[in-house]
Amino acid sequence: MSDQKPAPRQQLIQMITSYWTAQSIHVAAKLKLADLIKAGPKTAAELAQTTKTQPQALYRLLRALASVEIFREETDGKFHLTPMAECLLDQHGSMWAVAMMMGDEHFRSWGDLLYSVQTGKPAFDHIYGKPVFDWLSEHPEQAKIFDAAMTGFHGPETQAMIDAYDYTGVNTLVDIGGGNGTVLSAVLKKNPAIKGILYDLPGVIERAKKNLADAGLTSRCQTIAGSFFESAPTGGDAYQMRHIIHDWTDEQCHTILTHIRKVIPKTGRLLVIEMVVKPGNVMQPAKWLDLNMLVLPGGRERTEAEYREMYAKAGFKLVAFAQRQANAKPQAADPRYSWAARSAFGAAASPGKVHASPRKSPAAPPDMPQNTSPDPSTAAARRRSECCRHS
């Protein structure tokens, strides 16, 4: 009986009340309960004293979270960390920032989902009075949390992505909208012969400089401040965008791609890492992330056909893709060819005629590059996975 699927009514109740769990996790993250318990098991009363909360109310929160294996209460009344609770520690690559971000601006914006469905416009703009990335540029603390959340979301995928894609032959890689530099740093560390250019808004670049310095990559990576809606920097023979395209409307994406098309050399590559929405009723995180894009930045996740059309309008062509299961190593295609995996989408582009064929390799994880190339022929690689914006 325990293995049977819940009745439709029970399933729906679980879905309707799922925000109870999400907001409880957010509060635990905000109070940094995992960090406090890391030093040693503590009672709710002890934690309440440190966090300035009401002891009985905090106990009820911890008891509920322990029932879903986030924390564990022992017979002495003390709470311990569990594997999931450890993911809420405030440290690099954890889910702490994700819980913080999702429970604040995202939660408020999703509360106004009806507005987005009625108007087709971002609920975030309706609530906060301006687009999400403009708002983040004015709120440095929330911007830091956003950067950390993107690393928490996509960090584990980065290594799998760069292991799967062959960057051989690239001299200078330009990361468009490269955020805090995490992805570009990983590529440069694995490929010591490659130089990098990180391109993003001025405030983002300032946050990224420290990360590049800490990684010892200052001498190999140039930072350029600017907007991809206005231009793309010259100097690269490969251009990369990870979780950028899904943030924007088709018209805005056309602007971004057109700027890259103007500067990419004939032998260049364009790598695009995004999700691809599958047809039919199959459950896919991309379909829910698509709603998140509607509610927050106003962008969308796209189908294969929609990507093909978008690239064609900007002078690129998606010529092939290979499907792979998530959480397995993706097929490593020729750098100027196109390949894909189950959820995330990656691509490589080059202006001349592309002659390449994919090489077999094991399956792939959430974020992969897509191969696109400017006309007359291009290569684009894609991969289907479950993820967000730059990290």
Image (cartoon, helix red, strand yellow):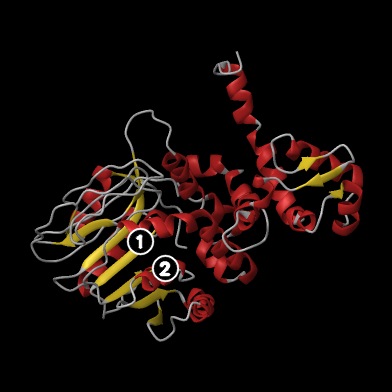
Q: Are marks 2 and 1 in contact (CB under 8 Å)?
A: yes
> x, y percentage for residue 360?
22, 48
Q: Determine crowd level at label 1: few under 14, some 14-19, many 20+ residues with C-alpha closer than 10 A.
A: many
- Relative to 72, 296 lies left or right: left
- Relative to 274, 379 lies left or right: left
**Quadrant assignment, res 371:** bottom left
Secondary structure of the residue carrying numbered label 2: helix
Assign the N terminus to one quadrant of the image. top right
Label 2 to label 1, Cα distance in Å? 8 Å
Question: Which circle marks residue 186 in the picture?
Answer: 2
Amino acid type of disc 1? Answer: Ile
Q: Is residue 96 above or below residue 202?
A: above
Amino acid type of disc 2? Answer: Ala
Q: Determine crowd level at label 2: few under 14, some 14-19, many 20+ residues with C-alpha closer than 10 A.
A: some
Question: Which circle marks residue 63 in the picture?
Answer: none
Total numbered badges shown on the rendered structure: 2
Residue located 41% across and 52% down the image? 299
Residue on which the image places disc 1:
162
- Relative to 307, 202 lies left or right: right
Residue located 32% across and 73% down the image? 174
> x, y percentage for residue 181?
45, 71
Q: Can residue 167 be seen in this view?
A: yes
